[in-house]
Image: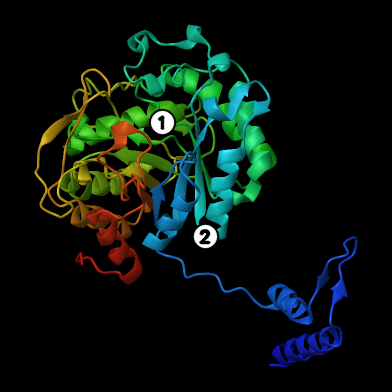
Amino acid sequence: MRVASLYTWFTFAILGLLSCKQGVEVSGNSQAITASDSTKTLLSVLAPVAAPPLGNPKFGVNTFHEDPPWNIDLDRQTGFAAVRLNAYWKFLETSHGVFTWTALDASIARAQQQHLAVTLVLFGVPDWAGNASLVEPRCATLPSDPMNRPQATPPANGYYGDFARALAQRYGTQIDAWEIWHEVETCDQWRGTPQAYQSQVLVPGVTQIRSVLPSAFIIAPGSSISSWGGTSTCSINCQLQRMLDYVTVQSTTTPGTRVLAQPINAFAVHFYDVKNSVVNVLLPTLNSAASWATFCSSCSSCAGTGSSSPISCNPCPTCPSPFWLTEFGYGLHQRAGAADNFNTTCSSAAIPGCGSPPLSFTISCTPGPDLVSVMEACRNTTNCQRAFVYDSRRANTCDTDFPLFNDDSSPRAAQRCVKSYLTSGSITCP
């Protein structure tokens, strides 16, 4: 009460003094401002600024820093509390030590203005930084998607650490979480071995970020887990085993167990599949498997999942329990050009020009309700710490089916569903 009274008294005393003049000369400038202008200036400095209410902190959306900054405004209006942005190395550091920050600066500044937490994904090797000798045989063929050439080639010694340090120094605590690469188990995104990932990316990246920000929250690279590898609990466990290959090593002191190659705070997974697989299989399996101290891949064979470890129990007592769904929703949106409602055709259709064979997904009949179902399941899953819908606006023509907003910024049906859930808690779409 006293503080408020002093604030009021002080404000009106200063305003009274200002009103005694018809104009005030600005230092170093002959421009005069009126008393009313002075009043507005002072009020803008003294008046408390009310932040907009935040949405559920568990939920965010993938947004690309190449998008116009106002796209982040749409994310906030939808009710998201966080955005996941790409720190796309090949575009940010065009030659060693030469950076182009403009677009990423604008996106992070806009996210700060909108009170959105930022998760930054550090990936994409520039042409000058790649070391072709680190490419493993299974990934010898270049990715079919031109967007992924040569970003998936492992970097030479030290370069990734330098990049990570530059980002940490520039953005500091504006970044809520740091994700160290992206889908390392796919040759499209990483063409090296798990060991090359650890030595060239994970260890130098984490070391350099924490040299600047000792308490930085760091998550493992988003691992693509989907029905392509099978949706049974056994198949999911095989894919989780593959994920562990990239961030853990066999313990030298306790045989039969694994330890983290670098301290991380959470695992991350990408799940591109229909709702039932996420809700009924992935989340429960992750939630129980997140007790890594007792993790055991019980499958007799993990053929096709890319795991390089023996199929046996590989508990990891030092692994963190929380996991983030850093991408989900690819299979939960209607196809471009389809009617903007919840009754679109369920089909597996190819997207022309998106790789050979063309990219193809089974599209949900009910994209909005399905997205909400996954979010609600995550909300009720103890170890599902955060989930990011993919995506806000399309990143390229191959993403045509999947954004919440059209290119002209108009919302699609799924966005209206998600907004209703985030802003009112309703699991029923309007």
User: At 43% across and 40% down in the image, what residue appears?
Assistant: 317
> In the displayed structure, does residue 331 sit left or right of residue 182?
left
Position in image of residue 273 (x %, y %): 21, 40
User: At 79% across and 81% down in the image, what residue appears?
Assistant: 35
Compared to residue 258, the image places residue 200 above or below, namely above
Q: Nearer the viewer, residue 342 or 338?
A: 338
Q: Residue 210's quadrant in the figure?
A: top right
Say if residue 271 shows up in the picture. yes
**Residue extending furthest right?**
28
Mark 2 lies on a secondary structure that is loop
Position in image of residue 178 (x %, y %): 53, 41
| Within-10-Å neighbours for mark 2: few <14, some 14–19, many 20+ | some
Q: For mark 1, what is the residue?
A: 257
Q: Nearer the viewer, residue 104 or 22?
A: 22
Q: For mark 2, what is the residue?
A: 114
User: At 53% across and 16% down in the image, what residue appears?
Assistant: 127
Amino acid under disc 1: Thr
Mark 1 lies on a secondary structure that is loop
User: At 41% across and 62% down in the image, what residue appears?
Assistant: 77
Chain-order first, disc 2 or disc 1? 2
Position in image of residue 215 (x %, y %): 62, 48
Q: Residue 268's quadrant in the figure?
A: top left
Q: CA distance from mark 2 to mark 1?
A: 44 Å
Q: Give the colour scheme of this rendering.
A: rainbow
Pointers 2 and 1 in contact (C-beta within 8 Å): no
> In the displayed structure, does residue 270 sit left or right of residue 414?
right
Compared to residue 193, the image places residue 93 above or below, namely below
